[in-house]
Image: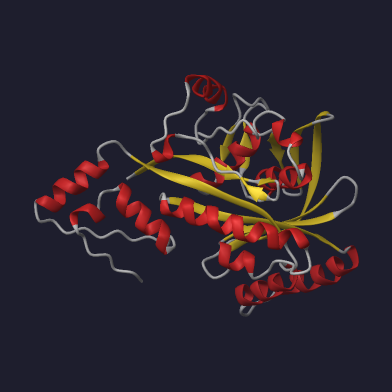
Amino acid sequence: CCCCRCCCCCCCRCCCCCCCRCCRRGLKLDVADEEMDNKYREPFFNFYDDRLMGLEWSKQPNPELTCQFFRLLALCHTVIPEGPPIPEQIRYEAESPDEAALVVAAKVFGFFLVKRSNTIITVRERLPDGVRETEYEILNILEFNSTRKRMSVIIRTSDNKIILYCKGADTVIYERLDRKHALNEQLKEITLQHMEEFGSAGLRTLCLAYTELDPKFYDEWNERFIEAKLSMEDRTAKVDAVGEQVEKNLRLLGCTAIEDKLQEGVPQCIKTLAQAGIRMWVLTGDKMVSRQGLGRLSRAYNIHLAAMIA
């Protein structure tokens, strides 16, 4: 019963996260804001914050963190761009609508995924000093699974830095944060607060973080990673174990929230079915606060349905 997703991003501003100003909580935007909002709205994206749109994010405190936030959205995924490299015409083939929503969000914020090969991702970045196309070498992809609850990509930048970008559940990201990094402590509390707010509204959340890797450490780790990938026994377990060795000392960037929009009439349909004495079950892997928000949106809670929590 779900249709398009709209993306709500929170990124670093004054060492905190920015919540969206939209109709998600029943707050009506001013007419001027609606006109500006329409300028940026497109499929998979329905978000507006005048502190972030255009290049306004670069005028906020800690613009480098915000830049890394958007860059992560443009790089940490398995999305394939198709069609002409024009923002209005390009199409993204993604494993899930959520991944597509985050890549579209990066494009709107000025980090446009243009093309991708097995080894190179090209991003057209709109920065304060101008627009440039940057190639990032894909070194490794640590895939998401239900055990890891996160995904990471390791890339080499044009200035030969090795960066690991990671996105995943707040619990797995928080336990891998660098305790010596001062901004982590400032960001953890406000990010967690916003994730709880988004979860209560029925949105699915992800935590974003990154770290720069020492080249010598990376070379040694990559040998172990290749060995694990080629293993004929317990390959998945070995790859996950090696991944643990590199996904650490992360620097928190913020979080994202994505809405599953119910099709028109779904809440009314659920209510009518319940009134007819028909029992319904909803299976979801979302965390508790998101389940409760979805229950309220679908009117499941309003009709006293029992919730089974696995």
Which of the colour schemes (rainbow, by chain, secondary structure, one colour) is used? secondary structure
Q: Where is residue 198 in the image (x, y as percent from the top left)?
A: 48, 50
Query: In the rendered view, would you say 64 is above or below 174?
Result: above
Q: Residue at x 64, y 26 (%)?
A: 87
Q: Which residue is drawn at 64% across and 38% down?
A: 106
- Report the quarter where the C terminus lies: bottom left
Residue 139: quarter of image:
bottom right
Q: How many labels does the image show?
A: 0
Query: In the rendered view, would you say 186 is above or below 108?
Result: below
Given residues 218 and 239, the one toward you in this image is 218
Q: Position of residue 292 (x, y in %)?
A: 35, 58
Residue at the extreme left of the image, as rendered: 276
Evaluate whether residue 225 shows in this view.
Answer: yes
Residue 91: quarter of image:
top right
Q: Residue at x 23, y 64 (%)?
A: 306
Residue 264: quarter of image:
top left
Q: Is residue 143 left or right of residue 3?
A: right
Q: Where is residue 165 in the image (x, y as percent from the top left)?
A: 71, 55
Residue at the extreme bottom of the image, as rendered: 233
Evaluate whether residue 143 shows in this view.
Answer: no
Given residues 238 and 104, the one toward you in this image is 104
Q: Which residue is drawn at 53% across and 39% down?
A: 20
Q: Is residue 273 left or right of residue 293?
A: left
Q: In this view, does 26 lie to the left or right of 252?
A: left
